[in-house]
Each structure stands twice: as structure tokens, then as C-alpha cells.
Amino acid sequence: MSLIGKEVEPFVTEAYQNGKFLTVNSDDFKGKWNVIVFYPADFSFVCPTELEDLQEQYATLKELGVEVYSCSTDTHFVHAAWHEHSEAIGKVEYPMLADPSQKISRIFDVLDETSGLSQRGSFIIDPDGVVQAVEITADGIGRDASQLVDKVRAAQYVRNHPGEVCPAKWKENAETLTPGLDLVGKI
């Protein structure tokens, strides 16, 4: 069942960020744009490349008013150890959510019940706490965070311009479409 258009269900968890432990809950998603990126496990192979790539886009996302979270079924203690021992993860500044109970992974429907690990899922959540975009890929397929930035920009544009939509490959300041009878069969 798709999560698009649905409000994020309540959760509370521990997180690691910049040398500190903190508590994060679903209410923290309200009032701003959010991106949450699930990945299978700390101390793995594709995951650090993705989280490092996401860190490279973090400043851009922050400029867009977006908070970024990563999440795996590891604990916040494991996130801290990984941050201290991995060159790639040592760069990460955004909160790393712990989901050892697998509750958050279940809420976002990315839990692989066989392995007990999260699948690679990316979610864009609007300031009302409602999911606007979802991407889920197989374990061996890494994601490109620059594409996530483009999707955030499109989601923000559509929210701020009711009645307009962003076509494929849309980039900021490009033309949009206004759905209507005059466009039927002409695209």
C-alpha cells in the first residue's frame, strides 16, 4: 500500500548526530520539509557511499529548508561507533536514527522481514508530515542524492503553485505544466 499522501505515523527513537545522542520523534517532521533515507546496515558496503553522497547534498537541502535523517535498524551506539571509524560516515552531520525495534522501518514499509534490515528507501515529507515522494531500491543499487534534491525542489514547487505540475526531468526555474483540456493529447 502506498504511503504517498499519508501522514507519518507516530514514533520516538534515539539518534546520533555530531558527537551527541538525541531523541527524535515524528512530531519533529512538522513545520518543515524532511527527507528520511533508510539503509540496510552500518559497517556495510553501499551504505557508506550513499550516506556520504547525501552529506555532500546536505547544505543544499538545508538551504531548501529540509532536514535530513538517515535510518537503519542499528542502535544509536552503533551509529556513533561507525561515525568514529569510517572516513565516509565521519563526514555525516545529519541525524542518524536508530531503529532496533524495527518500528520505523515498518511504519515506512521498508522492513525486510527475512533479514530484519531496512531496504533502501528514500522519503520526502512535507511540512504537514505527509509523504510526498517515495523511492525504494534493491540492496545492491545505490542512490544518487542529487536526484533527491531535484525531487524536493519539484515537491516544493507543486506545493507552492497549486494547479501546476512538474514534467519529467524538471529542474528549478524550468517550465511546468498546467493540466487541462487544452493539453490533452498534445504532449
Image (spheres, rainbow, N blue to C red):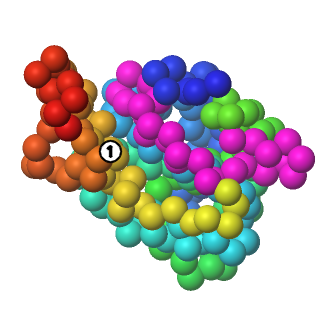
Vertical placement of residue 183 versus 170, above or below? above
Q: Residue at x 35, y 28 (%)?
A: 127
Q: Nearer the viewer, residue 163 or 151?
A: 163
Vertical placement of residue 50 versus 116, above or below? below
Vertical placement of residue 96 versus 162, above or below? below
Residue 14 screen position, x and y as percent: 66, 43
Residue 63 screen position, x and y as percent: 23, 52
Q: Residue furthest front?
A: 185
In the image, is 56 to the left or to the right of 170? right
Q: Residue furthest bottom?
A: 87
Q: Nearer the viewer, residue 167 or 28?
A: 167
| Magenta stretch prevailing secondary structure | strand
Q: Is residue 130 inside the magenta stretch?
A: yes
Q: Give the secondary structure at mark 1.
A: helix
* Tag 1 residue: 152
Rendering quarter of residue 107: top right
- Label 1 crowd (10 A; few <14 / some 14-19 / many >=20): many
Q: Is residue 143 inside the magenta stretch?
A: no
Residue 157 can be seen in this image: no
The N terminus sits in image quarter: top right
Residue type for callout 1: Val
Q: Residue at x 68, y 67 (%)?
A: 140
Q: Residue at x 79, y 45 (%)?
A: 112
Rendering quarter of residue 156: top left
Which stretch did the figure color magenta?
110-137
Vertical placement of residue 126 versus 173, above or below? above
